[in-house]
Image (cartoon, rainbow, N blue to C red):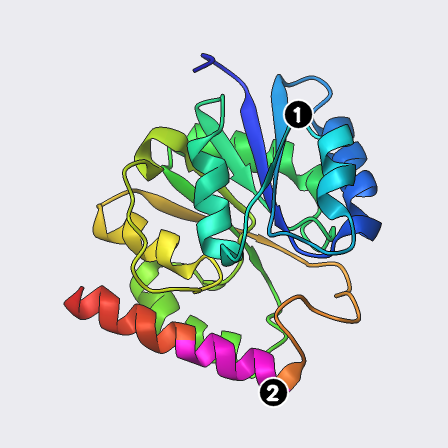
Amino acid sequence: MKSSGVSIVTTTFNEREYISAFVTKVREALKNIPHEVIVVDDSSPDGTYEVARELADKAYKVYRFGQTRGLLYGIERASYPIVVTLDADLENPPELIPRLLEVFSHEEYDVLVASRTTLPRISERLTSRTLGRLLGVSDVYSNFRVYRRDCMLNIKLRLGETFGGELLVIAKKRGLRIGEYLYKPPPRRGQPRIGGTLKANLRIMWATLKLLVYYFLG
């Protein structure tokens, strides 16, 4: 384990068109900070892994992990004590990472969530008003986060896919200090990873229900 610097972790599925720009923008944002880029690819058929293997510091090909398990897999393999997770499609702006690290360090958080000021889906807004209030963040499903790596080890995921939500609930149940940083998101891409409007809302509401049960009864 290296003493200082930051590991950047992203999960991918059919992100070949984004991965080169993603790595470039991350390296530009962190040009004065020791870092590594870790890509966990969920067996994309479009060749994302092959591109990532050439450009990232570490690239892992996994099978049917989903986003939550993939993020944890990357965190566990990080070389630096601080880990930033974000999406590869640039909806989470890499240029914001230095500011997040500054806030994270100054406030001495264990987890910092970069929350969008506008949530596009009704399911996300409902989650904000329920589970979000319990966790102290307005954007539960934002995976643009900063973690202290040692706080997120020895975790056994239990809920299946929760789009990163289970990691946040676990952090809360462990008594970790969770902070929030609000930012205005750029325009969303045309075909979101988790599906169209109806499918995405149903999947998010199901994840929220599982997380609420786990929060109170798990």
Element carrying mark 2:
helix
- Position of residue 9 in the picture relative to residue 204 (left or right): right
Q: Amino acid at mark 2?
A: Leu
Question: Which picture quadrant has residue 126?
Answer: bottom left
Element carrying mark 1:
loop
Spot occupied by residue 189 in the image (x, y as percentages of width and height): 78, 65
Q: CA distance from mark 2 to mark 1?
A: 37 Å
Spot occupied by residue 13 in the image (x, y as percentages of width and height): 67, 56
Compared to residue 130, the image places residue 5 above or below, namely: above
Q: Residue at x 22, y 46 (%)?
A: 174
Q: Residue at x 62, y 24 (%)?
A: 36
Front residue of 199 and 175? 199
Magenta span includes 179: no
Label 2 neighbour load within 10 Å: few <14, some 14-19, many 20+: few
Residue located beneath label 2 in the image = 198
- Check residue 57 in the rendering and tell me which mark sits there, or answer none: 1
**Residue bounds of the magenta highlight:** 198-206
Q: Are marks 2 and 1 in contact (CB under 8 Å)?
A: no
Q: Amino acid at mark 1?
A: Asp
Q: Quadrant of the C terminus?
A: bottom left
Front residue of 91 and 53? 53
